[in-house]
Image (cartoon, rainbow, N blue to C red):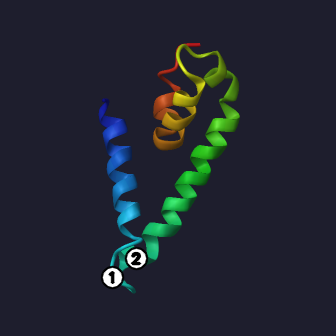
Amino acid sequence: MSLPKIAVLVGWLVMAAGFVAPEGSLLARLGPPLFWLTAAIHAVEVVVFRERIRRGAGSPLRHVLATLVFGFFHVREIEA
């Protein structure tokens, strides 16, 4: 797994931690909105890159799920 993908996973974990962080903490205030914003951006990327995802080798579902998690860092690895 590439360093950018590891960084994205760490980001997801930090944002998700905001859902269980103590109420009123900076993480609790910023984590969930950033989580949903990132999820929405990655969903838009699935739509924008749908043709590349569809034509890519392997399972399109796997590419969609990986794009939802890693965004452009996965899309750029799809060989079309």
For mark 1, does the 10 Å Cα neighbourhood hold few (<14), some (14 to 19), or many (20 or more) residues?
few
Q: List x then y, in percent, for residue 40.
A: 61, 53
Q: Residue at x 33, y 44 (%)?
A: 7
Q: Residue at x 57, y 30 (%)?
A: 61
Q: Identify which amino acid the numbered label 1 is placed on.
A: Pro
Residue at mark 2 to residue at mark 1: CA–CA distance: 6 Å
In the rendered structure, the answer to whether residue 17 lies left or right of residue 54 reads: left
| Closer to us: 72 or 59 | 59
Question: Do the numbered discs 2 and 1 sit on residues whose CB atoms are within 8 Å?
Answer: yes
Q: List x then y, in percent, for residue 67.
A: 53, 36
Q: Residue at x 40, y 53 (%)?
A: 12
Q: List x then y, in percent, for residue 64.
A: 57, 33
Which residue corresponds to mark 2?
Answer: 28
Q: Is residue 72 above or below residue 26?
A: above
Q: Is residue 45 above or below residue 78?
A: below
Q: List x then y, in percent, for residue 46.
A: 63, 37
Q: Secondary structure at mark 2?
A: helix
Q: Specify the quadrant of the image occupied by residue 21.
A: bottom left
Q: Is residue 39 above or below residue 50?
A: below
Q: Secondary structure at mark 1?
A: loop
| Closer to us: 16 or 3 | 16
Q: Identify which amino acid the numbered label 2 is placed on.
A: Ala
Which residue corresponds to mark 1?
Answer: 22
For mark 2, does the 10 Å Cα neighbourhood hold few (<14), some (14 to 19), or many (20 or more) residues?
some
